[in-house]
């Protein structure tokens, strides 16, 4: 018998080495910190399907990752298991055409009995999933169907062809161990119950992993389009359109089919593989690295939910980066909402096969198109597909997260209200670029050039200077929003309210728009709560706070280190990431990227910005401005006043905070921010930037290092406050009801541009009309501004109170500058 085992081991090793002359594996989840194996407990691996090739790949993976072998005996007290693995499914039928069914194998029975007999023993079951290439099932030629690893079980012959075609792109996913002793429980020991429970848990686990890696089963594209047109919602829209326009229903049905064909994606794994290879080469040429955080949480959510990825929109390449990274991490790429302007010859076809579905800019006046699109989205969610869209609508030209546009969010919520069969989760994604490809374009647009429309040609144009270094990119996945939980918290009666609604697209609950608006803002808030702090943002934030964008190198290094440590000590959220290194290293890194200038001097090097880089770096500063907003606002209030009562500081802080929160999507509501205010006040006092005496707040002595830090901190948020007070100064010099919102926006923008020229403010985003428009909207939302019957703006006495508070927040020179610009105009 021992000779037989030695011979079988030699043959197994021989076949493993032969197989891996061709096969290449990408192993995930097997690192020690991810797998979390207990070295004192035996380990046994479980594979879903019985295949010899699977055994070979498993053993090779354990060898490479220095894990316990799957081929050795597993000692269990006085007995042992012949091999340290088992299969969850057993084969049925003939050799070359067989199925497999889940079963409780002899090894699993032996393990469960051992644990039931010995309370002190345990076994760690490690599920291992193997994918030969990663492809969803969909319409293909017979050859592609034959050679695609999918949801069905391959016969030995088909498995051979799969290995030949996809073996060099084999993906192996190790999952965290399952403790048999924990399944056994503390109650009466029952080996059969433990066997059944373990088998059921493993079946669910493998199904979830498979859905995460290769996506749900996909149907024939034309069948999908036909299914959409045959739904009651679209049939009803056809009937109504026929009645209104007099067109025959059959003609309208054909129009609906054309709409469906125009919209629907045609995702093909061959295209995904092609794009991945092309993009990986591109990323390696452009960037020094792409890093992701909180990926494991994403994998968990995708197992049970239809996922909506909602990234911030900073660059043309956002969606390419996200899909590339997800595929690299073993998560199926999402279907991406793309503008119809990208559906160009050749390019549109490639994007469609890469997962893009196309949507028109406006649905207004075309109810049939709206019905077809809404039904397409609904079927995507119902079948568990992941989807990606940008809640901001367009790219941010200033580096701030833009005000969300709720159209796609509304469709998502409506789809869920229509059918809660599949739970939906929103996953916020933050893109942290050290240097955006479109930086020069954004700078031109902020200076008045016409904004370029979103197009694939814009992407190619952005890649024209590939020799330049664009640094690193961080993709931070934020805290997921489970839609059902959000509805429960914000509209507890939603389940009862929708029972009487037959068609959610035609008849929405009264609360629908408010909930969707709130959800859209919550998404933007959670995007910001997962920001990436990097050397460029830190250096830019400090250097741009100086009047001439120049500073002693040592002083700059000290300040960047200080403010980075400040953020770490009073952490904004657990999803924020920080760079490694010191202030000196961050300055050198930013200098190597060509964003800083260094001038040698006997008394110490001077770091400065030229005009172009000063404008470019405002984008980086704005990426993380919200993280500094609360302490910077406290610094603004206290720097101009040697001593103030604590209550007065708090009152002014509260009066301004709501505006800053609305613009920067800060996570604390007015009812919650007091605790954060007190924490920052205490921390600033500990660092010497303030002194707390009884009920008073004292600033440091002018000229001290602590005062320099305080005024630098205040400068972070000062341009935002200056814009606010420009609007307020204009309102207080105009009679109530003398302007409409558009006139106020235009006048405020002109005044800010004039102030920028007169006082040398080298930042075109200072007079960005979108920021003024948003602030005016906030004033209207809060009832401070109201439109009368003629569309003119009436303002309340709170405007005058805000003007009085400016004496505490702005120093005399700034107030005088604003008054000088706005007076007599």
Image: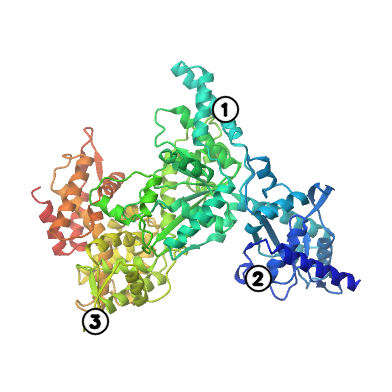
Q: Residue furthest left?
A: 824
Distance from the alpha carbon under mark 1 to that under mark 3: 75 Å
Q: Quadrant of residue 178?
A: bottom right
Residue located at (18% from left, 53% from top)? 752
Left or right: where 151 falls relative to 522: right
The location of residue 581, given as percent across then percent down, is 41, 75
The location of residue 65, given as percent across then percent down, is 65, 70
Above or below 105: residue 451:
above
Q: Quadrant of residue 407?
A: top left
Residue holding disc 1? 232
Considering only order in the chain, which callout, 3 or 1, is on the residue closer to the N terminus? 1
Considering only order in the chain, which callout, 2 or 1, is on the residue closer to the N terminus? 2
* Front-lying residue, 780 or 135: 135
Look at the numbered disc 2 and give the secondary structure of its residue: loop
* Front-lying residue, 3 or 495: 3
Label placed on residue 65 = 2
């Amino acid at each position: 018998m021992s000779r037989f085992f030695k011979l079988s081991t030699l043959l197994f090793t021989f076949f493993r080495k032969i197989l891996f002359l061709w096969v290449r594996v990408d192993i995930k989840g097997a690192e020690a910190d991810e797998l979390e194996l207990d070295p004192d407990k035996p380990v046994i691996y479980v594979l879903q399907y019985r295949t010899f090739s699977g055994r070979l790949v498993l053993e090779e993976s354990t060898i490479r990752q220095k894990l316990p072998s799957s081929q050795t005996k597993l000692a269990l007290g006085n007995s042992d298991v012949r091999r340290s693995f088992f299969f969850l499914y057993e084969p049925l039928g003939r050799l070359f055409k067989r199925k497999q069914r889940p079963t409780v194998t002899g090894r699993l029975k032996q393990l469960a009995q051992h644990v039931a007999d010995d309370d002190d023993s345990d076994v760690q079951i490690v599920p291992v999933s193997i994918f030969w290439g990663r492809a969803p099932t969909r319409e293909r030629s017979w050859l592609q169907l034959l050679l695609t690893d999918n949801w069905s079980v391959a016969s030995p012959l088909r498995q051979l062809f799969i290995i030949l075609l996809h073996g060099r792109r084999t993906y192996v996913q190790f999952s965290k161990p399952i403790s048999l002793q924990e399944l056994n429980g503390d109650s009466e020991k029952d080996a059969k119950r433990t066997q059944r429970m373990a088998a059921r848990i493993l079946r669910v686990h493998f199904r979830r992993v498979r859905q995460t890696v290769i996506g749900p089963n996909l149907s024939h594209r034309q069948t999908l389009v036909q299914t959409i047109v045959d739904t009651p919602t679209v049939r009803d829209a056809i009937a109504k359109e026929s009645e209104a326009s007099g067109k025959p229903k059959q003609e309208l049905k054909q129009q609906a089919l054309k709409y469906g064909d125009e919209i629907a994606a045609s995702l093909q794994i061959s295209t995904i593989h092609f794009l991945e290879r092309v993009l990986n080469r591109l990323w390696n040429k452009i960037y020094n690295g792409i890093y992701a955080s909180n990926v494991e949480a994403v994998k968990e959510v995708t197992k049970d939910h239809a996922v909506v990825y909602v990234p911030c929109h900073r660059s043309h390449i956002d969606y390419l980066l996200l899909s590339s990274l997800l595929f690299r991490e073993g998560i199926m790429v999402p279907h991406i909402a793309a503008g119809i302007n990208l559906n160009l010859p050749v390019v549109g076809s490639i994007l469609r096969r890469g997962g893009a579905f196309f949507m028109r800019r406006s649905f207004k006046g075309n109810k049939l198109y709206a019905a077809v699109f809404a039904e397409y989205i609904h079927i995507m969610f119902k079948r568990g597909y992941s989807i990606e869209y940008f809640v901001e609508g367009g790219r941010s030209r200033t580096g701030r997260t833009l005000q969300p546009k709720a159209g796609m969010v509304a469709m998502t919520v409506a789809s869920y209200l229509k059918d809660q069969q599949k739970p939906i989760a929103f996953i916020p994604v933050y893109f942290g670029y050290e240097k955006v490809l479109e930086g020069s374009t954004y700078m031109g647009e902020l200076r008045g050039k016409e904004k370029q429309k979103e197009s694939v040609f814009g992407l190619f144009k952005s890649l024209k200077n590939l020799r330049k270094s664009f640094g690193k990119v961080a993709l931070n996945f934020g805290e997921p929003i489970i839609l059902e939980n959000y509805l429960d918290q914000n509209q507890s009666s939603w389940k009862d309210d929708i029972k009487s609604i037959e068609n959610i697209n035609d008849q929405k609950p009264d609360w629908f728009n408010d909930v969707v608006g709130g959800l859209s803002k919550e998404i933007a808030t959670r995007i910001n709560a997962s920001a990436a702090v990097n050397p460029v943002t830190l250096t830019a934030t400090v250097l741009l706070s100086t009047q001439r964008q120049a500073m002693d190198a040592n002083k700059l290094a000290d300040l960047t280190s200080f403010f980075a440590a400040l953020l770490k000590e009073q952490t904004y959220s657990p999803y924020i990431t920080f760079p490694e290194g010191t202030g000196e290293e961050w300055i050198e890194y930013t200098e190597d990227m060509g964003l800083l200038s260094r001038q040698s001097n006997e008394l110490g090097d001077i770091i400065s910005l030229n005009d172009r880089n000063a404008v470019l770096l405002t984008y980086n500063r704005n990426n993380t401005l919200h993280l500094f907003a609360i302490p910077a606002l406290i610094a603004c209030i206290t720097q101009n006043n040697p001593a103030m009562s604590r209550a007065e500081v708090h009152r002014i802080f509260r009066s301004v905070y709501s505006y800053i929160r609305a613009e920067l999507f800060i996570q604390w509501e007015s009812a919650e921010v007091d605790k954060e205010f007190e924490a920052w006040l205490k921390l600033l006092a500990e660092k010497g930037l303030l002194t707390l005496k009884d009920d008073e707040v004292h600033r440091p002595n002018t000229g001290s290092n602590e005062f320099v830090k305080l005024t630098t901190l205040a400068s972070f948020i000062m341009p935002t406050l200056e814009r606010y007070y420009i609007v307020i100064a204009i309102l207080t010099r105009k009679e109530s009801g003398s302007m409409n919102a558009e006139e106020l926006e235009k006048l405020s923008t002109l005044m800010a541009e004039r102030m920028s020229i007169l006082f040398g403010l080298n930042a075109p985003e200072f007079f960005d009309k979108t920021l003024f428009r948003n602030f005016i909207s906030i004033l209207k939302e809060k009832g401070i501004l109201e439109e009368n019957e003629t569309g003119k703006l009436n303002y309340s006495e709170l405007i005058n109170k805000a003007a009085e508070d400016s004496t505490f927040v702005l120093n005399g020179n700034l107030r005088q500058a604003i008054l000088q610009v706005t007076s007599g105009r």
